Structure formats: structure tokens, C-alpha cells
Amino acid sequence: MSRNLLITGGAGFIGSHVVRLFVNTYPDYRIFNLDALTYAGNLENLRDVEDAPNYRFIKCDITDEVSINRVFVENGIDAVIHLAAESHVDRSIMDPLGFVKTNILGTAVLLNAARISWKDRKDGLFYHVSTDEVFGSLGETGFFTEDTPYDPRSPYSASKASSDHLVKAYHHTYKLPVVISNCSNNYGSHQFPEKLIPLMIHNIRHSKPLPVYGEGLNVRDWLWVEDHARAIDVIFHHGENGETYNVGGFNEWKNIDLIHVLCRIMDQRLGRPEGESAKLITYVKDRAGHDLRYAIDASRIERELGWKPSLQFEEGLEKTVDWYLSNEEWIAHITSGSYQEYYQHQYVTR
Ligand code: NAD
Ligand code: TYD
């Protein structure tokens, strides 16, 4: 079946991998990448597909109700994969209202446009790409499943939880066809260097301090971004209407252990003596309300839809490091301007 598919946030990190996968895999779909190009959006991420006949970029803010309604009608949009969001926890602590606006209001505007333009049609699909952070924080043991109650703790996770609830409300109230996935931490190429892995690679490369929040003992479950894009493809095509799917890497790491692995890979790549990069590790004041541990039980998507992660973590980290080291122009562009201001005020050394 052919689709007029709207992908929001396609100029961002995960969105660009999703757009690339869909443009290359589904030549019969008309794929519209709608993005406001905030600091996190970058069309350089999509140079390799921008001339494809089944691809079009639309610059638009998802909170702009009039323009969003027009995009749906003019292009006969019949499916949405919604990724556009403010996505960084530290920024949500500094500017919670910006997150409320984009993540909650923006999602509501998109849902409403779908509701109005699809009316009673049964073949539409609104897919919301969400996070495991909606489930809150785990102790030393246990996993988030699809049935774990929501318990968000940061302005970011609370805004994503709110948007998940709106998606579910539109399904129950208006019978809008929806699916949601809640995924763990992604890593890979094209990630903005404010998130842990690309920030550490960038700072090691330039011999700058590596800011470790608190004791570095917080745990995250890391997934290769291209595996996430594959999961989105599988859920989009085979997920059950009204259902949610957890997506994760079965790959838990304490931050400090992960940083040591990155330091070792970077020492090798940069020809530095072993242990040189780790000397840059600097413990800084902890993030406010820092969630201790996230861990996803991704057995449902494996059991029901046959998806599982493909890549071993060390291999994925090496590929990621190599991508950043061979794309210095991309980094230089991204880290010019407001990036410098953002990092000037960030850290208090412990
Ligand atoms: P990102 O910050 O790299 O990209 C977000 C994109 O959304 C950017 O291209 C930006 O320009 C666009 N955008 C922001 N506000 C917009 C607005 N008002 N209107 C239109 N476009 C706007 O984010 P990401 O890491 O690629 O995450 C994508 C989605 O996946 C988000 O919804 C996020 O919550 C979710 N998610 C991310 C992770 C992760 O580890 N990064 C894990 C699970 C879920
Ligand atoms: P991050 O990449 O911001 O993802 P999230 O907070 O959404 O999980 O952070 C991953 C982990 O790394 C988290 O426990 C916070 C920690 N962290 C640092 O210790 N130093 C840093 O500079 C950053 C950005 C994160």
C-alpha cells in the first residue's frame, strides 16, 4: 500500500536515520520530512537522500496549528511518524516551558490535524516515538515493561509522558489509529554533541574535560540508532493498533564504565598512550533529579514482531567514534554559535 507519510523531526538525530531508511526502502511512499530546524535539526544529516523523488522537506513548527492542518490537507497525509521534540534532559531543566510547548502542544496539534483530516478513515496511522524515561527511575534491579506505570521525573520525561497520554486519549476517544514505542538511549552517527556519547567523543578529541555527573554510577541501556530505526519500520508496518512497544538494547552500562571504554577506543584511534584520555575525566555537580537507572525489557517486540538489536556495543561505539572522527566539518558546523554559549555555564566541578 502506498503512503503519504509525514515524518516529523526528520532533520534530527533519530529522525534522519528513519527518513533515510524509509526513503531508501519504500520508493512508492511519498515521504514528507517536517522539521522546524531548531539547534538540533540539520539538513546536512540528509544530503544523501535530499534529491530522491519520493522525498520532500517542509520547514514548519509543529505548534503552528494553521500550517500543520494545511500540510495534512494539501499533501493527503495518511500516516505520521512523530519524532519532533525537544529531547535533552539538561535543557528541559533550564527551560521547562519550551518542552511543554513543543512536546505537549505540538503533539496535540498533530493529533488534531490527523483527527480532522482523517475523519472516519480506518487506514490512517499516527505513530508516536517516545522514550523509556516516561517510566521513571529503576533501582538496582528490574526492567521497564509495557505495563510499568508512568512515573516521569524530569520536565523532559513529563512532557513525553503527557504526549503519550494524549496519543492514547485520541485513540480511545476518537478511535484514531495509533501506535507508540518507548525506547532506551540511542547512540550512533549524527547525534548532537550535548548527549553523553558524542559529547565525550568531542571533548576527548579536543583534550577538554569530560564532565561526569555525580559519581558516574547512573545506568543507561544503549541502543544503536539504526537498530531503533529498524524497530520503527517494523512497528509502523506490523504493530497492533492502540498498542505500545518497548524498544531497548539489553545493554546496560554505568556512565563511568562507558566513558572508560570510549577513552580506550579514542586513545587507540588518536595514537595516544593508553590511559591518556581518561585523565580528562572530571566529576561535576550532579544533574538535578538525576534518574538512577533505566533498563528496558524489549521481549515483546522480539516475540511478537521479530525485532532484536543487531550490533554488539563495542562494535557500535567504534563505528560511532570513527564517524565523528571522519566528519569534523559536521561537528565544526554544529558546535559553532549557540553551542559555545550553552556549554559556558554548564558545569560546577565537585
Ligand atoms: P533531536 O533533538 O536530535 O531532534 C529533534 C528534531 O525535532 C530536530 O530536528 C528539531 O529541529 C525538531 N524539532 C524540535 N522542535 C520542533 C518543533 N517545534 N517543530 C518541528 N520540529 C521540531 O532528537 P532525537 O534524539 O533524534 O529524538 C527524536 C525523538 O525520539 C524525540 O521525540 C525523543 O523524545 C525520542 N527519543 C529519543 C531517544 C534518544 O536517545 N535520543 C530515545 C528514545 C526516544
Ligand atoms: P544523556 O545523554 O543526556 O541522556 P539521558 O539523560 O536522556 O539518559 O545522559 C546519559 C547519562 O549520562 C545520564 O545519566 C547523564 C550522564 N551525563 C554525564 O554524566 N555527563 C554529561 O555531560 C552528560 C550530557 C550526561
Image (cartoon, rainbow, N blue to C red):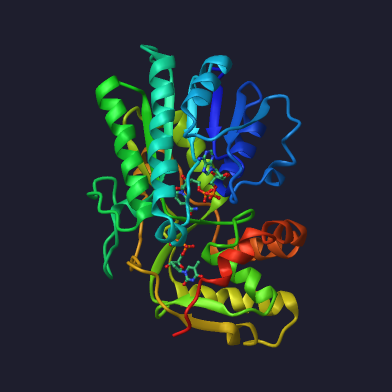
Of residues 43 and 60, which is closer to you in this image? 60
Q: Position of residue 26 (x, y in %)?
A: 62, 27
Horizontal relation, residue 91 to residue 115: left or right: right
Q: Position of residue 11 (x, y in %)?
A: 62, 42
Measured along the vertical axis of the image, is residue 123 above or below residue 224? above
Q: Quadrant of residue 123?
A: top left
Residue at 70% in and 75% down: 206
Looking at the rendered image, the quarter that the C terminus falls into is bottom left
Q: Is residue 314 visible?
A: no
Looking at the rendered image, the quarter that the N terminus falls into is top right
Residue at 63% in and 73% down: 203
Residue at 29% in and 33% down: 168
Measured along the vertical axis of the image, is residue 81 above or below residue 37? above
Of residues 349 and 313, which is closer to you in this image? 349
Q: Is residue 85 visible?
A: yes
Numbered circles on residues, count: 0
Q: Quadrant of residue 2?
A: top right
Of residues 158 and 52, which is closer to you in this image? 158
Measured along the vertical axis of the image, is residue 346 above or below residue 136? below
Horizontal relation, residue 52 to residue 128: left or right: right
Horizontal relation, residue 201 to residue 117: left or right: right
Q: Position of residue 288 (x, y in %)?
A: 36, 69
Q: Quadrant of residue 295?
A: bottom left
Q: Position of residue 240 (x, y in %)?
A: 35, 29
Horizontal relation, residue 146 to residue 321: left or right: left
